[in-house]
Image (tube, rainbow, N blue to C red):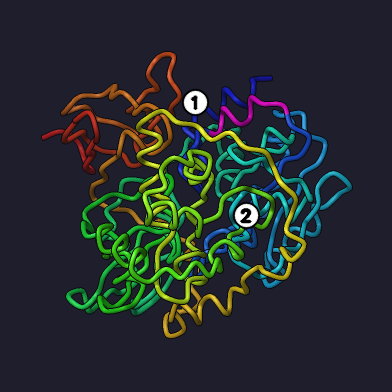
Amino acid sequence: MRNISTTVREAGVVGAGGAGFPTHVKLAARAEIVVVNGAECEPMLKTDQQLVARYPEQLIKGLKLAMEATGAQKGIIALKDKYQAAIAALEPYLTDQLQISIMPDIYPAGDEVITIWLTTGRRVPPGGIPINIGVVVNNVQTLINVAKAHDGKPVITRTLTVTGAVKNPLTVTVPIGTSLQEVLNLAGEGRGDDLAYILGGPMMGSLITDLSAPVTKTTGGLIALPKDHPLIKRKQMPLETVLRIAKTVCEQCSFCTELCPRHMIGHELSPHRLIRAVNYKAMGDLQTLTSALTCSECGVCEAYACPVGISPLRVNRALKAELRAQGVKYQGELRKEDPMAQHRLIPSSRLVQRLKLGPWYKEAPLALETYEPEEVSLSLQQHIGAPAIPVVKVGDNVKRGQVVGEIPEGSLGARVHASLDGTVQQVTPQMITIRKGGAT
Protein backbone atom coordinates (compact mmCIF):
# COMPACT_ATOMS: atom_id res chain seq x y z
CA MET A 1 0.00 0.00 0.00
CA ARG A 2 1.35 3.46 -0.91
CA ASN A 3 2.18 5.94 1.83
CA ILE A 4 -0.77 8.31 2.28
CA SER A 5 1.48 11.31 2.76
CA THR A 6 3.16 10.61 -0.59
CA THR A 7 -0.18 10.25 -2.35
CA VAL A 8 -1.39 13.54 -0.88
CA ARG A 9 1.86 15.24 -1.89
CA GLU A 10 1.48 14.07 -5.49
CA ALA A 11 -2.12 15.35 -5.56
CA GLY A 12 -1.11 18.86 -4.47
CA VAL A 13 -3.30 18.95 -1.36
CA VAL A 14 -2.84 22.00 0.87
CA GLY A 15 -4.76 23.42 3.81
CA ALA A 16 -7.99 24.69 2.28
CA GLY A 17 -9.05 26.69 5.31
CA GLY A 18 -5.98 28.77 6.00
CA ALA A 19 -2.71 29.86 4.46
CA GLY A 20 -2.27 26.67 2.45
CA PHE A 21 0.23 24.62 4.45
CA PRO A 22 1.13 21.51 2.40
CA THR A 23 -0.97 18.72 3.86
CA HIS A 24 1.53 15.94 3.19
CA VAL A 25 3.83 17.47 5.82
CA LYS A 26 1.08 17.37 8.46
CA LEU A 27 0.27 13.77 7.61
CA ALA A 28 3.92 12.75 8.03
CA ALA A 29 3.78 13.73 11.73
CA ARG A 30 2.75 11.52 14.62
CA ALA A 31 -0.35 12.62 16.50
CA GLU A 32 -2.87 11.43 19.08
CA ILE A 33 -5.91 13.28 17.72
CA VAL A 34 -6.99 14.54 14.30
CA VAL A 35 -9.43 17.43 14.55
CA VAL A 36 -11.63 18.36 11.60
CA ASN A 37 -12.23 22.09 11.72
CA GLY A 38 -15.77 22.49 10.44
CA ALA A 39 -16.62 25.53 12.58
CA GLU A 40 -16.56 27.97 9.67
CA CYS A 41 -16.87 30.83 12.10
CA GLU A 42 -16.49 33.70 9.62
CA PRO A 43 -19.92 35.31 9.15
CA MET A 44 -21.34 34.92 5.62
CA LEU A 45 -19.31 31.84 4.58
CA LYS A 46 -21.25 28.59 4.11
CA THR A 47 -18.90 26.20 2.32
CA ASP A 48 -17.79 23.65 4.91
CA GLN A 49 -21.16 23.05 6.53
CA GLN A 50 -22.70 22.32 3.12
CA LEU A 51 -19.85 20.08 1.99
CA VAL A 52 -20.20 18.00 5.16
CA ALA A 53 -23.94 17.61 4.62
CA ARG A 54 -23.51 16.68 0.96
CA TYR A 55 -20.35 14.54 1.09
CA PRO A 56 -20.13 12.96 4.56
CA GLU A 57 -18.66 9.70 3.24
CA GLN A 58 -15.76 11.51 1.58
CA LEU A 59 -15.06 13.52 4.71
CA ILE A 60 -15.04 10.41 6.90
CA LYS A 61 -12.75 8.66 4.41
CA GLY A 62 -10.34 11.60 4.48
CA LEU A 63 -10.41 11.68 8.27
CA LYS A 64 -9.68 7.97 8.53
CA LEU A 65 -6.79 8.32 6.09
CA ALA A 66 -5.38 11.20 8.14
CA MET A 67 -5.69 9.15 11.32
CA GLU A 68 -3.98 6.20 9.67
CA ALA A 69 -1.15 8.38 8.41
CA THR A 70 -0.51 10.08 11.75
CA GLY A 71 -1.23 7.11 14.00
CA ALA A 72 -4.02 9.02 15.74
CA GLN A 73 -6.47 7.00 17.79
CA LYS A 74 -9.24 9.58 17.77
CA GLY A 75 -10.87 11.78 15.17
CA ILE A 76 -12.98 14.74 16.27
CA ILE A 77 -15.22 16.65 13.86
CA ALA A 78 -15.85 20.14 15.20
CA LEU A 79 -19.22 21.54 14.11
CA LYS A 80 -21.57 24.20 15.42
CA ASP A 81 -24.89 23.08 16.82
CA LYS A 82 -26.77 25.04 14.13
CA TYR A 83 -25.24 22.87 11.37
CA GLN A 84 -28.00 20.30 11.84
CA ALA A 85 -27.92 18.93 8.28
CA ALA A 86 -24.17 18.28 8.56
CA ILE A 87 -24.54 16.63 11.96
CA ALA A 88 -27.35 14.38 10.74
CA ALA A 89 -25.33 13.34 7.68
CA LEU A 90 -22.37 12.28 9.83
CA GLU A 91 -24.22 10.42 12.56
CA PRO A 92 -24.30 7.04 10.74
CA TYR A 93 -20.49 7.06 10.55
CA LEU A 94 -19.72 7.83 14.20
CA THR A 95 -17.83 5.34 16.39
CA ASP A 96 -15.85 5.43 19.63
CA GLN A 97 -12.89 6.67 17.58
CA LEU A 98 -14.83 9.05 15.31
CA GLN A 99 -16.77 11.68 17.20
CA ILE A 100 -18.56 14.98 16.65
CA SER A 101 -17.81 17.83 19.03
CA ILE A 102 -20.61 20.39 19.14
CA MET A 103 -19.28 23.92 19.43
CA PRO A 104 -21.09 27.10 20.46
CA ASP A 105 -22.00 29.53 17.71
CA ILE A 106 -19.20 31.94 18.52
CA TYR A 107 -16.35 33.77 16.84
CA PRO A 108 -13.51 32.80 16.30
CA ALA A 109 -14.37 29.13 16.74
CA GLY A 110 -12.56 28.42 13.45
CA ASP A 111 -9.16 29.59 14.72
CA GLU A 112 -7.44 26.21 15.03
CA VAL A 113 -6.03 27.06 18.46
CA ILE A 114 -9.52 27.90 19.75
CA THR A 115 -11.02 24.87 17.97
CA ILE A 116 -8.56 22.58 19.75
CA TRP A 117 -9.28 24.23 23.11
CA LEU A 118 -13.05 23.92 22.68
CA THR A 119 -13.00 20.32 21.45
CA THR A 120 -10.18 18.70 23.44
CA GLY A 121 -9.43 21.06 26.33
CA ARG A 122 -5.80 21.17 25.23
CA ARG A 123 -4.06 24.51 24.74
CA VAL A 124 -1.45 25.20 22.08
CA PRO A 125 1.47 27.12 23.63
CA PRO A 126 2.16 30.65 22.35
CA GLY A 127 4.42 30.50 19.33
CA GLY A 128 3.71 26.77 19.09
CA ILE A 129 1.73 24.59 16.69
CA PRO A 130 -0.96 21.93 17.29
CA ILE A 131 1.43 19.00 16.87
CA ASN A 132 3.28 20.24 19.96
CA ILE A 133 0.31 18.93 21.98
CA GLY A 134 -0.33 15.83 19.87
CA VAL A 135 -3.02 17.28 17.59
CA VAL A 136 -3.31 17.68 13.82
CA VAL A 137 -6.02 20.00 12.49
CA ASN A 138 -7.44 19.87 8.97
CA ASN A 139 -10.25 21.79 7.31
CA VAL A 140 -13.29 19.97 5.86
CA GLN A 141 -12.38 20.66 2.23
CA THR A 142 -8.78 19.59 2.90
CA LEU A 143 -9.85 16.15 4.08
CA ILE A 144 -12.28 15.74 1.20
CA ASN A 145 -9.30 16.45 -1.06
CA VAL A 146 -7.28 13.84 0.86
CA ALA A 147 -10.03 11.29 0.09
CA LYS A 148 -9.97 12.29 -3.57
CA ALA A 149 -6.19 12.02 -3.66
CA HIS A 150 -6.46 8.45 -2.40
CA ASP A 151 -8.70 7.80 -5.43
CA GLY A 152 -6.10 9.28 -7.77
CA LYS A 153 -7.69 12.73 -8.17
CA PRO A 154 -5.48 15.80 -7.71
CA VAL A 155 -6.72 19.16 -6.40
CA ILE A 156 -8.13 21.00 -9.43
CA THR A 157 -11.32 22.60 -8.06
CA ARG A 158 -12.28 24.87 -5.20
CA THR A 159 -15.65 25.28 -3.52
CA LEU A 160 -16.32 28.79 -2.20
CA THR A 161 -19.16 31.04 -1.09
CA VAL A 162 -20.10 34.10 -3.17
CA THR A 163 -22.35 36.40 -1.18
CA GLY A 164 -23.14 39.88 0.06
CA ALA A 165 -24.63 42.49 -2.27
CA VAL A 166 -25.24 40.05 -5.13
CA LYS A 167 -28.51 38.92 -6.70
CA ASN A 168 -28.19 35.21 -5.92
CA PRO A 169 -25.77 34.28 -3.11
CA LEU A 170 -24.46 30.77 -3.65
CA THR A 171 -21.72 28.31 -2.86
CA VAL A 172 -20.09 27.14 -6.06
CA THR A 173 -17.38 24.77 -7.23
CA VAL A 174 -15.04 26.10 -9.92
CA PRO A 175 -11.79 24.97 -11.52
CA ILE A 176 -8.79 26.49 -9.77
CA GLY A 177 -7.59 29.42 -11.85
CA THR A 178 -11.08 30.70 -12.73
CA SER A 179 -11.17 34.49 -12.51
CA LEU A 180 -12.96 36.06 -9.54
CA GLN A 181 -15.02 38.12 -11.99
CA GLU A 182 -16.44 34.95 -13.53
CA VAL A 183 -17.21 33.57 -10.08
CA LEU A 184 -18.97 36.82 -9.18
CA ASN A 185 -21.02 36.64 -12.37
CA LEU A 186 -22.38 33.26 -11.26
CA ALA A 187 -24.07 35.03 -8.36
CA GLY A 188 -25.66 37.59 -10.66
CA GLU A 189 -23.52 40.53 -9.54
CA GLY A 190 -25.13 43.80 -10.61
CA ARG A 191 -24.16 47.22 -9.24
CA GLY A 192 -20.44 46.84 -9.86
CA ASP A 193 -19.58 50.54 -9.73
CA ASP A 194 -21.11 50.82 -6.25
CA LEU A 195 -19.45 47.76 -4.78
CA ALA A 196 -16.18 46.73 -3.19
CA TYR A 197 -15.01 43.16 -2.66
CA ILE A 198 -13.53 41.13 0.18
CA LEU A 199 -11.64 37.92 -0.56
CA GLY A 200 -12.32 35.52 2.30
CA GLY A 201 -14.48 36.30 5.31
CA PRO A 202 -15.52 39.75 6.53
CA MET A 203 -13.25 39.58 9.60
CA MET A 204 -10.00 38.14 8.25
CA GLY A 205 -10.49 38.60 4.52
CA SER A 206 -8.60 41.13 2.44
CA LEU A 207 -9.93 43.93 0.27
CA ILE A 208 -9.30 43.29 -3.43
CA THR A 209 -9.58 45.55 -6.47
CA ASP A 210 -8.50 43.19 -9.26
CA LEU A 211 -11.32 40.80 -10.13
CA SER A 212 -9.22 39.28 -12.90
CA ALA A 213 -7.21 37.54 -10.15
CA PRO A 214 -7.70 33.76 -10.09
CA VAL A 215 -9.29 31.44 -7.57
CA THR A 216 -6.64 29.45 -5.71
CA LYS A 217 -6.67 26.37 -3.48
CA THR A 218 -7.21 28.62 -0.44
CA THR A 219 -9.94 30.97 -1.73
CA GLY A 220 -12.67 30.63 0.88
CA GLY A 221 -15.16 33.23 -0.25
CA LEU A 222 -15.92 36.38 -2.19
CA ILE A 223 -18.09 39.04 -0.54
CA ALA A 224 -19.52 42.09 -2.30
CA LEU A 225 -20.46 45.08 -0.15
CA PRO A 226 -21.30 48.73 -0.83
CA LYS A 227 -18.22 50.91 -1.03
CA ASP A 228 -19.43 53.01 1.89
CA HIS A 229 -19.89 50.02 4.21
CA PRO A 230 -17.94 50.40 7.51
CA LEU A 231 -16.03 47.15 6.86
CA ILE A 232 -14.79 48.43 3.51
CA LYS A 233 -13.81 51.80 4.94
CA ARG A 234 -11.90 50.12 7.77
CA LYS A 235 -9.97 47.85 5.43
CA GLN A 236 -9.12 50.82 3.19
CA MET A 237 -7.68 52.91 6.02
CA PRO A 238 -3.91 53.55 5.58
CA LEU A 239 -1.61 52.31 8.34
CA GLU A 240 -0.45 55.87 9.01
CA THR A 241 -4.05 56.84 9.82
CA VAL A 242 -4.48 53.77 12.02
CA LEU A 243 -1.38 54.69 14.03
CA ARG A 244 -2.44 58.32 14.34
CA ILE A 245 -5.89 57.37 15.62
CA ALA A 246 -4.37 54.92 18.10
CA LYS A 247 -2.06 57.57 19.49
CA THR A 248 -4.84 60.13 19.71
CA VAL A 249 -7.73 58.25 21.27
CA CYS A 250 -6.53 55.03 22.95
CA GLU A 251 -7.69 55.20 26.56
CA GLN A 252 -6.06 51.91 27.65
CA CYS A 253 -9.41 50.40 28.62
CA SER A 254 -7.95 46.92 27.86
CA PHE A 255 -11.18 45.63 26.29
CA CYS A 256 -9.13 44.46 23.29
CA THR A 257 -7.02 42.29 25.61
CA GLU A 258 -9.93 40.98 27.67
CA LEU A 259 -11.71 39.78 24.52
CA CYS A 260 -8.58 38.57 22.67
CA PRO A 261 -9.15 34.81 22.14
CA ARG A 262 -5.45 33.98 22.40
CA HIS A 263 -5.05 36.01 25.60
CA MET A 264 -8.08 34.30 27.14
CA ILE A 265 -6.57 30.83 26.79
CA GLY A 266 -3.29 31.86 28.42
CA HIS A 267 -1.12 33.52 25.77
CA GLU A 268 0.83 36.60 26.77
CA LEU A 269 -0.57 38.62 23.86
CA SER A 270 -2.06 41.86 25.22
CA PRO A 271 -3.14 44.19 22.39
CA HIS A 272 -3.61 47.22 24.67
CA ARG A 273 -0.02 46.93 25.88
CA LEU A 274 1.22 46.73 22.29
CA ILE A 275 -0.70 49.90 21.43
CA ARG A 276 0.84 51.60 24.47
CA ALA A 277 4.33 50.46 23.51
CA VAL A 278 3.96 51.81 19.97
CA ASN A 279 2.29 55.06 21.06
CA TYR A 280 4.97 55.93 23.57
CA LYS A 281 7.90 54.34 21.72
CA ALA A 282 8.54 51.97 24.60
CA MET A 283 10.50 49.79 22.26
CA GLY A 284 12.82 48.41 24.92
CA ASP A 285 10.26 45.87 26.14
CA LEU A 286 11.11 43.24 23.55
CA GLN A 287 9.00 40.55 25.24
CA THR A 288 5.85 42.65 24.90
CA LEU A 289 6.62 43.51 21.29
CA THR A 290 7.41 39.96 20.22
CA SER A 291 4.07 38.75 21.63
CA ALA A 292 2.56 40.33 18.50
CA LEU A 293 3.93 37.31 16.63
CA THR A 294 1.33 35.13 18.37
CA CYS A 295 -1.62 37.19 17.07
CA SER A 296 -3.98 35.14 14.88
CA GLU A 297 -5.33 38.31 13.21
CA CYS A 298 -8.90 37.26 14.00
CA GLY A 299 -9.94 40.93 14.14
CA VAL A 300 -11.92 40.80 17.41
CA CYS A 301 -9.89 43.69 18.82
CA GLU A 302 -10.70 46.11 15.99
CA ALA A 303 -14.15 45.00 14.85
CA TYR A 304 -15.78 44.20 18.17
CA ALA A 305 -13.80 45.08 21.30
CA CYS A 306 -12.53 48.64 20.84
CA PRO A 307 -15.08 51.32 21.83
CA VAL A 308 -13.20 54.12 20.05
CA GLY A 309 -12.43 52.57 16.67
CA ILE A 310 -8.74 51.72 17.06
CA SER A 311 -7.24 48.79 15.13
CA PRO A 312 -4.81 46.83 17.34
CA LEU A 313 -4.93 44.22 14.57
CA ARG A 314 -3.27 46.53 12.05
CA VAL A 315 -0.66 47.58 14.59
CA ASN A 316 0.08 43.93 15.42
CA ARG A 317 0.32 43.06 11.74
CA ALA A 318 2.84 45.83 11.12
CA LEU A 319 4.88 44.74 14.14
CA LYS A 320 4.84 41.13 12.98
CA ALA A 321 6.15 42.06 9.56
CA GLU A 322 8.99 44.10 11.07
CA LEU A 323 9.94 41.43 13.61
CA ARG A 324 9.91 38.65 11.02
CA ALA A 325 12.07 40.72 8.69
CA GLN A 326 14.60 40.90 11.54
CA GLY A 327 14.38 37.15 12.18
CA VAL A 328 12.96 37.65 15.68
CA LYS A 329 11.01 34.79 17.26
CA TYR A 330 8.68 34.80 20.25
CA GLN A 331 9.68 32.95 23.39
CA GLY A 332 7.14 32.82 26.17
CA GLU A 333 5.30 30.43 28.44
CA LEU A 334 1.67 29.36 28.43
CA ARG A 335 -0.07 31.12 31.30
CA LYS A 336 -3.23 30.30 33.21
CA GLU A 337 -6.49 30.28 31.30
CA ASP A 338 -8.77 33.25 32.00
CA PRO A 339 -11.50 31.94 34.34
CA MET A 340 -14.00 34.08 32.39
CA ALA A 341 -12.90 32.75 28.99
CA GLN A 342 -16.03 30.72 28.27
CA HIS A 343 -18.17 33.76 29.04
CA ARG A 344 -16.24 36.15 26.81
CA LEU A 345 -16.67 34.28 23.56
CA ILE A 346 -18.49 36.41 20.99
CA PRO A 347 -21.89 35.16 19.73
CA SER A 348 -21.94 35.12 15.94
CA SER A 349 -25.33 36.84 15.85
CA ARG A 350 -23.99 39.74 17.88
CA LEU A 351 -20.93 39.98 15.66
CA VAL A 352 -23.09 40.15 12.52
CA GLN A 353 -25.07 42.97 14.13
CA ARG A 354 -21.91 44.83 15.14
CA LEU A 355 -20.47 44.49 11.62
CA LYS A 356 -23.74 45.79 10.12
CA LEU A 357 -24.01 42.72 7.88
CA GLY A 358 -27.66 41.94 8.60
CA PRO A 359 -29.02 42.95 5.16
CA TRP A 360 -26.55 40.61 3.44
CA TYR A 361 -26.56 37.72 5.90
CA LYS A 362 -28.39 35.21 3.69
CA GLU A 363 -28.33 31.58 2.69
CA ALA A 364 -25.92 30.66 -0.10
CA PRO A 365 -27.08 27.22 -1.35
CA LEU A 366 -24.58 24.75 -2.77
CA ALA A 367 -24.64 24.51 -6.57
CA LEU A 368 -24.05 20.90 -7.59
CA GLU A 369 -22.64 21.53 -11.05
CA THR A 370 -19.01 22.56 -11.54
CA TYR A 371 -18.62 25.73 -13.58
CA GLU A 372 -16.45 25.41 -16.71
CA PRO A 373 -14.49 28.53 -17.77
CA GLU A 374 -12.81 29.06 -21.14
CA GLU A 375 -9.48 29.92 -19.52
CA VAL A 376 -7.70 29.47 -16.20
CA SER A 377 -4.66 31.19 -14.71
CA LEU A 378 -2.88 28.91 -12.27
CA SER A 379 -0.79 30.62 -9.61
CA LEU A 380 2.42 28.72 -8.93
CA GLN A 381 2.30 29.72 -5.26
CA GLN A 382 -1.04 28.77 -3.76
CA HIS A 383 0.56 27.56 -0.56
CA ILE A 384 3.11 28.24 2.15
CA GLY A 385 6.64 27.52 0.95
CA ALA A 386 8.46 27.78 -2.36
CA PRO A 387 6.48 28.41 -5.57
CA ALA A 388 6.09 25.47 -7.92
CA ILE A 389 8.38 25.28 -10.94
CA PRO A 390 6.67 25.19 -14.37
CA VAL A 391 7.10 21.86 -16.19
CA VAL A 392 5.17 22.87 -19.34
CA LYS A 393 5.81 25.43 -22.06
CA VAL A 394 3.69 27.68 -24.27
CA GLY A 395 1.86 25.64 -26.92
CA ASP A 396 1.74 22.40 -24.93
CA ASN A 397 -1.59 20.58 -24.90
CA VAL A 398 -2.47 19.55 -21.35
CA LYS A 399 -5.13 17.35 -19.80
CA ARG A 400 -7.18 18.04 -16.69
CA GLY A 401 -5.21 16.75 -13.69
CA GLN A 402 -1.82 16.85 -15.44
CA VAL A 403 1.08 18.23 -13.38
CA VAL A 404 2.07 21.66 -14.68
CA GLY A 405 4.03 22.91 -11.66
CA GLU A 406 6.41 20.77 -9.62
CA ILE A 407 7.76 21.20 -6.08
CA PRO A 408 11.37 22.46 -6.16
CA GLU A 409 13.74 19.74 -4.97
CA GLY A 410 14.34 19.85 -1.24
CA SER A 411 11.76 22.58 -0.65
CA LEU A 412 8.47 22.90 1.19
CA GLY A 413 5.80 23.30 -1.46
CA ALA A 414 2.89 21.82 -3.39
CA ARG A 415 2.26 20.62 -6.90
CA VAL A 416 -0.01 22.50 -9.29
CA HIS A 417 -2.22 20.64 -11.79
CA ALA A 418 -4.08 21.68 -14.92
CA SER A 419 -7.73 22.32 -14.04
CA LEU A 420 -9.08 21.95 -17.60
CA ASP A 421 -8.15 20.37 -20.93
CA GLY A 422 -6.50 22.91 -23.19
CA THR A 423 -3.41 24.63 -24.49
CA VAL A 424 -0.80 26.50 -22.47
CA GLN A 425 -1.01 30.17 -23.49
CA GLN A 426 1.52 31.74 -21.15
CA VAL A 427 4.16 30.65 -18.64
CA THR A 428 5.83 32.98 -16.14
CA PRO A 429 7.58 32.30 -12.82
CA GLN A 430 4.29 33.28 -11.14
CA MET A 431 1.52 31.93 -13.37
CA ILE A 432 0.52 29.40 -16.02
CA THR A 433 -2.42 30.27 -18.28
CA ILE A 434 -4.37 27.52 -20.04
CA ARG A 435 -7.13 28.02 -22.59
CA LYS A 436 -9.65 25.42 -23.74
CA GLY A 437 -9.01 23.74 -27.08
CA GLY A 438 -5.95 22.58 -29.00
CA ALA A 439 -2.99 24.62 -30.26
CA THR A 440 -3.65 26.89 -33.22
203 sits to left or right of 102? left
The furthest residue to the left:
440
User: Residue 357: which numbered mark, if any?
Assistant: none
Pick whichever of labels 2 and 1 is earlier in the sequence.
Answer: 1
Q: Quadrant of the N terminus?
A: top right
- Which residue bears the numbered disc 1? 10
219 sits to left or right of 267? left
Residue drawn at point x = 67 percent, y = 40 percent: 125
Image: magenta residue range: 23-30
Q: Secondary structure at mark 2?
A: helix
Q: Nearer the viewer, residue 366 or 109?
A: 109
Residue drawn at point x = 41 percent, y = 43 percent: 283
- Which residue bears the numbered disc 2? 263
216 sits to left or right of 27? left
The furthest residue to the top:
409
Type of the residue with mark 2: His
Prevalent SS, magenta region: helix
